Image (tube, grey):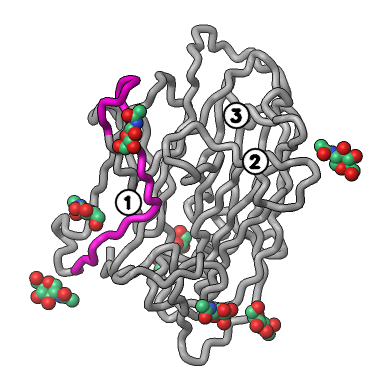
Amino acid sequence: MGTLSQNWVILSIILLLALSTYSDASTKTKSTVKSAVFYSPKVDLSPGISSNKYYYDVKFPRGHIALKNFNGEAVDEDGNSVPLYEAYLHHWVVVRYHKPINSTSTDDNVIVRNAGVCQGDVLPQYFGLGAETRKTETHIPDPFGIEIGNPAEIPAGYEEKWLINLHVIDTRDVEDRWGCTECRCDLYNVTTDANGQPLSLGYKGGLQCCIDDAQCRLKEGYKGYNRTVYLKYTVKWVDWDDSIISVKIYIPGMTDTVKKSNGLNGLNVTHNCMIEYDIESCNTTRKHGTGCVNVTKTSFPLKKRGYVIYGVAHQHAWGLGSTLLWKEWEVICISLPKYGNGSKQEMRKAT
Ligand SMILES: *[C@@H]1O[C@H](CO)[C@@H](O)[C@H](O)[C@H]1NC(C)=O
Ligand SMILES: *[C@@H]1O[C@H](CO)[C@@H](O)[C@H](O)[C@H]1NC(C)=O
Ligand SMILES: *[C@@H]1O[C@H](CO)[C@@H](O)[C@H](O)[C@H]1NC(C)=O
Ligand SMILES: *[C@@H]1O[C@H](CO)[C@@H](O)[C@H](O)[C@H]1NC(C)=O
Ligand SMILES: *[C@@H]1O[C@H](CO)[C@@H](O)[C@H](O)[C@H]1NC(C)=O
Ligand SMILES: *[C@@H]1O[C@H](CO)[C@@H](O)[C@H](O)[C@H]1NC(C)=O
Ligand SMILES: *[C@@H]1O[C@H](CO)[C@@H](O)[C@H](O)[C@H]1NC(C)=O
């Protein structure tokens, strides 16, 4: 690894847990797997621009179904993959919500959270990754599936919808590509956060600096042109049937400062997922020791027992890997990112 300046790393882990027992796990699921490719609304980019937008009521499979697969990636107007060194896919998250049938205000929407474990409205999504999406396996094996669109779960007067929050940073012609992708405040023309409040003193980087429409500093005499990208997402599903075992989605955050105390009804666990964390800058002359590797851990109890069916970690550039452990020593799964060298050949191979 080269010189690491301040890095803001975002890490969350998606886990799918089957909570019921499945002694009879034979694949009874006979339904045919359906597949569809969707595109988000267009994202207009110009060199150095950060686009962090919310798209409501996006295209999504309808009906009472079980999702088997969800994969997203950034493509251009011809449907070709966009290299990460041109458009860094900071994150995409897909959120399920219930909308009052006649309402036009997004304030009336009720988000349907995943099963946990973060507090309140933090990390509520069903799916979400970023630059690491390409070549990431997302398949949920039979007899499991993520149940959605069950009419019995949709309150009367509401309909089920999906929203996508898509954050892309155009790094063409920028002065410092790593700085822009890691949202260093001194590179962006931002002095207030997304709510218009002045940035807190000492805040050096993170999501508050690469807000929607923020501009990252460009090289002298840049010549980049405007472009349009889309999130292309491929969804696979089967029609719901009673032989499918419904899995619950858990999205713990690496930054969660889990507090445990004895409450009235047994263990009281308070989560505080902060989404991002700051890693001290590292001096390259120490790169042969462990000085340039930061290891961060968090642990949390789960109220219910279950089987882990699928897991993947969301990691930003410079992330070296993530491991999910049971009882501090038993490895459940490992997510290791692959890094390219930014060549066109490699892009063609990757897609
Ligand atoms: C929505 O509006 C239509 C037309 O005004 C009305 O007929 C319908 O009952 C309304 N539905 C709900 C759930 O309020
Ligand atoms: C930053 O620059 C972009 C592009 O010029 C502009 O749209 C945006 O309003 C600017 N933001 C601030 C906070 O000045
Ligand atoms: C490129 O996009 C920016 C921001 O939307 C806009 O101000 C500018 O006029 C566009 N340039 C061209 C050449 O279309
Ligand atoms: C659980 O802990 C939180 C904060 O530590 C506290 O606010 C809350 O009242 C506690 N709940 C119970 C049931 O003890
Ligand atoms: C990793 O970074 C975190 C956040 O800055 C820090 O608290 C921790 O001590 C670091 N750990 C190591 C092993 O450097
Ligand atoms: C890196 O560390 C070495 C040895 O501790 C020191 O001599 C050097 O000045 C440091 N470089 C920077 C850029 O901090
Ligand atoms: C980059 O990767 C491609 C494909 O793996 C390879 O052909 C090329 O030689 C590499 N370039 C460099 C500079 O390492």
The quadrant in which residue 244 appears is: top right
Horizontally, is 34 left or right of 255 in the view? right
Q: Residue at x 26, y 70 (%)?
A: 3
- Residue type at mark 3: give it: Ile
What is the number of the mark on residue 97?
2
User: In the image, is 313 to the left or to the right of 287?
Assistant: right
| Left-right relation of 303 to 126 | left
Q: Earlier in the sequence, mark 2 or mark 3?
A: 2
Q: What span is in magenta?
A: 260-283
> For the residues carrying marks 1 and 3, which lies nearer the camera in this image?
3
The reply to whether the residue tagged 2 has its Cβ within 8 angstroms of ligand 1 is no
Label 1 SS: loop
Q: Was residue 274 drawn as part of the magenta stretch in this picture?
A: yes
Camera-side residue of 87 and 42: 42
Ligand 4's quadrant is top left
In this picture, is 136 found above or below 291? above
Q: Which residue is mark 1?
A: 320
Q: CA distance from mark 1 to mark 2?
A: 33 Å
Residue visible at 60% across and 58% down in the picture = 74
- Beta carbon of the mark 3 residue lies under 8 A of ligand 1: no
